[in-house]
Image (cartoon, grey):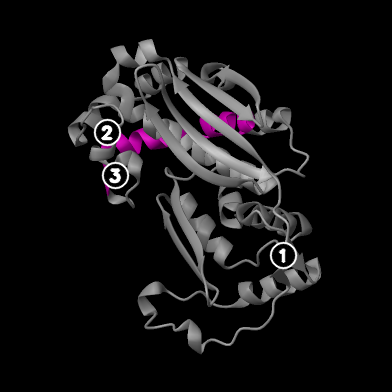
Amino acid sequence: MAIDTTLYNKRLFPHVDYTLDAYTLQPGGIICVTLFTYNEQAKTTVQEMMETALPLNDKLIHTALVQLITKKEQQLGTTGIEDIRKELREIDALPWRNFNDIEIIDPKTLTLRPGALYPFKNAREQATKKLHVSFLIKQEFIESHRELLPLFWHIAWLMSESIFVTLSSETGIYGDGVQRTYAARSTKLTHNFRLNANLPLTIDGAIATIRETLFTLYKSGALERLTEALHSGTLDDRPSTPTHNPAFLFQKGAVFIGPAGWRCIATNENCQLLFEHTKVAINFAGERDSGDLRQIFDL
């Protein structure tokens, strides 16, 4: 979360400026981070980040705890925020190990000690609320411009992932998967989220964050960088994503596209055309709202 937030504050976005995959292996508590950068600004930001201590303020720790509780849907106990901060400082002070230099790590040989965070026995399930953010393209338009479907999926995925970065860093919301729908009456990408029911987030607060994120994304030039990567074929050199898999794209619209096709459709003009016909819809615990993308971008 801290990595995504730092990159976002530099107006760098997932999928177009970097790819991040981070997870913890249990038992053993082995933290694995895979991070690819695609331009000099992202590379420099990551280098600076690795040389700087994490900003372990109360808000960051609390938000991470809320996200963990939401993911597990179970209350966790703690010996105190200062103990958590101390343990995180100890981890942050450890040198990173390059994956290529690792031989074998057997978790049975590791000595584990009780930490500042622990599960309660017979803990009650934590109530959660659901948030769904969808990017919908007008069906009449996309049926007459089917060649633009692959570009729509890329743009929608970039916007969806960027919203996840800001919502998770601000509220501790948990990503619950992405759905892509192409049917006779609906073409949309939906990002599903869960958040702790005790959080004070309202639909108005969610809308404000989503609109600000999308406007920042547009004004930062990230969409132009995405278009350039698709047009030039440099996206092919990056870790694969479902959105760039020809077989996946074919399943989501029966359009098969190769490098020459991307050079034809990945243009700023086509992006603007998609913006004009795309709507953002929000369903927050049963409350609904929507808006045109061109209005959010102030076109």
Is residue 10 at all visible to an observer of this figure?
no
Helix, strand or loop for disc 3: helix
Residue at the spot 65% in from the left edge and 67% down from the top edge: 53
Helix, strand or loop for disc 2: helix
> What is the x, y in percent for residue 86?
74, 74
Describe residue 130's horizontal placement relative to residue 28 as left or right: right
Q: Quadrant of residue 79?
A: bottom right
- Point out the stretch of residues depicted in magenta: 210-236
Question: Separation of disc 2 and disc 3 at Cα?
Answer: 23 Å
Closer to the eye: label 1 or 3: 1
Identify the amino acid type marked 2.
Gln
Identify the amino acid type marked 1.
Asn
**226 or 68: nearer the eye?**
68
Q: Quadrant of the N terminus?
A: bottom right
Q: Quadrant of residue 213?
A: top right
**286 or 47: nearer the eye?**
286
Of helix, strand and loop, which mostly describes the magenta segment?
Answer: helix
For label 2, the residue is 251
For this orientation, the residue located farthest to the front is 122
Question: Separation of disc 1 and disc 3 at Cα?
Answer: 51 Å
Residue at the spot 40% in from the left edge and 50% down from the top edge: 38
